[in-house]
Image: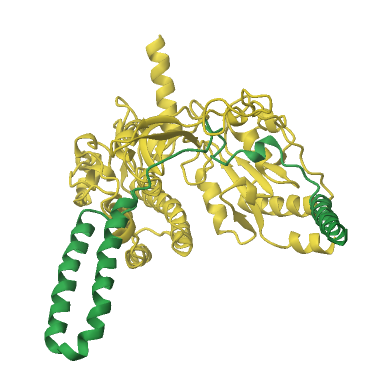
Chain colours: A green, B yellow
Amino acid sequence: MAALGAALTVFLAAVFAVGSIRWLGDVLNPLEVTASERVPFMGGSEPGTHAWNRFHIRYYTMALLFLAFDMEMVFMYPWAVVFIREGLISLVEMLIFILVLLVGMIYAWRERGFDWA
Amino acid sequence: MRLARLAATAPVPVFPVAGVGARDAVLDLRLRPELTLVDTPRAADVLLVAGNLPAGPVSGLAAIHDQIPPPRVTVRWGGSLPEDLAFAHRIDGGEDEVVAGLVDVHRRALLGELSSEPPVLPDLDPIEWRGVGPYGQGGKGMTGGTPYGRPLAERAPDRDGLELDQLIVTMGPWLPAFPPGLRLVVKLAGDLIREVEPGPSPLFGVASSPDIFGAALTAPVLIVDLEMARARHHLRRLAEALRVHDLESLEFRALRLARELRPGDREMAQDLAQRIERSRLYSWVLNGVGVVDPGRVAGLGPLARATGIADDARLDDPAYRELGFEPLTLQGGDTATRWRQRLNEVMQALDLAGRAGDRTTGGHGVVESPRGRLAVTEPNPAIRLLGLVPATLEGLEWGDAVATLLSLDLDPVESGAETAAAGEEHAA
């Protein structure tokens, strides 16, 4: 019974809180939004279609670039562990690897892979 | 009330609608510290309607009026009161009078001395949102029905071979980023333009008095006046573009320069050109954007010369030959090159004005206007510029498209006046 009372109290408190916030909103801003104000501003014209639409955001170029950098990081973690032991040769190897990745990035840049559209 | 009084001391947020003949006057208001010219009616308190407008209801004006949140007031600067905003406060006079009037009307509206104007349009959605089911659910589309009377986007092939949605939106005629009166019907895939067509402008067919270039077709005018008008024209169009790129301090510089230009004094224009170059606007934002077809720019003045074609009506003018006039050209034909070309031509115009003395030109039926070759027997270059819009803008992102559009220097009034005249001839 006590649990039901507690639940009822919480429920009533929530209803009161929501009601009072909405009432306060109406008191502070008594103006109603008219149909004209609900329309997006397009310079005086009405929209011909509803705004819901699906378009191709073209994530794949970004995904490919992400993969390039991701693979770089995957390789760099074990490399960092053995770097001291292997010495200069591992540094050169890593530079060659990064250079190859850089070529890929420059290629993507040339192909306008960084442009959104 | 104290808060309202405090609010009344702030710059007046004004949404301007510039009719025929008021584009430059409204643009100059941006320099006034008493006003803030805002980009959307939601941010405005006052609707300013300036210049000549068509008789009868003006397309889009009532909708913009109703989108201004109360307390809202409308001010008409000169001209007759539009039919649908007949309650507007009318202010005649120059810039100082209209600024003082706007400040006064705004203060009185905030203090409650003026009541807020009621909406002009009825508070009705086009159609109630209702699907086919008993609770309004179901039907066509994502959640069914026709939301608020607007159909959902139609399907169209995407450039990646997918069938995706295509939004059809009509932008303008009073979009602050566009030349006043320009309406474009745009088919968008995301923010990419698939198709674009200029729509009918409310300013088509509205009477306008010819500017100095129009006057030079039939009567001689001083070269110094003509070249100064050319420099001012290019600087004001540049200022509009700088505003859209959010480079406000450069915009104000261009506007101030347009007001303070003196013949022969190219230093300030050179300084502006250097500052714009340093802003990296050209190289980062506008480089390679909106390249126009070189086969379609003959006779289009700065557009032709920015693609390397030395096309200029002043070449055939003995008065200009005496001044040693040589057309300036650049290679590229993109948006960045067009603005570089215009700034170069501003400096050239100032040089020519400085050397022209009391030489006159005009009266031969042909004159080189800032938009290109203006001739009594040929269609206005503004019509051909408007014709370039579909091919140049298709495939661009929305932001690039607006930047390109501004660099084409469109004028719906001039293109409309000629189109209306051509239509009448055709009908006859």
Specify the quadrant of the image occupied by residue A40. top right
Please provide percent x and percent y for residue B116: 78, 43
Between residue B280 and residue B368, name the one nearer to us: B280
On screen, B317 above or below B32?
above
Which residue lies at the image location 16% right of the left edge and 83% below the top edge?
A91
The outermost residue toward the front is A1
Which residue lies at the image location 47% right of the left edge and 32% below the top edge?
B153
Please provide percent x and percent y for residue A65: 27, 60
Specify whether A88 is left or right of B123.
Answer: left
Specify whether B287 is left or right of B26.
Answer: left
Specify the quadrant of the image occupied by residue B280. bottom left
Which residue lies at the image location 84% right of the left edge and 49% below the top edge?
B113
Please provide percent x and percent y for residue A43: 54, 39
Q: Quadrant of the N terminus of chain B?
A: bottom right
Please provide percent x and percent y for residue B264: 33, 60
User: Does residue A114 appear in this view?
Assistant: no
Q: Quadrant of the C terminus of chain B?
A: top left
Q: How many marks?
A: 0
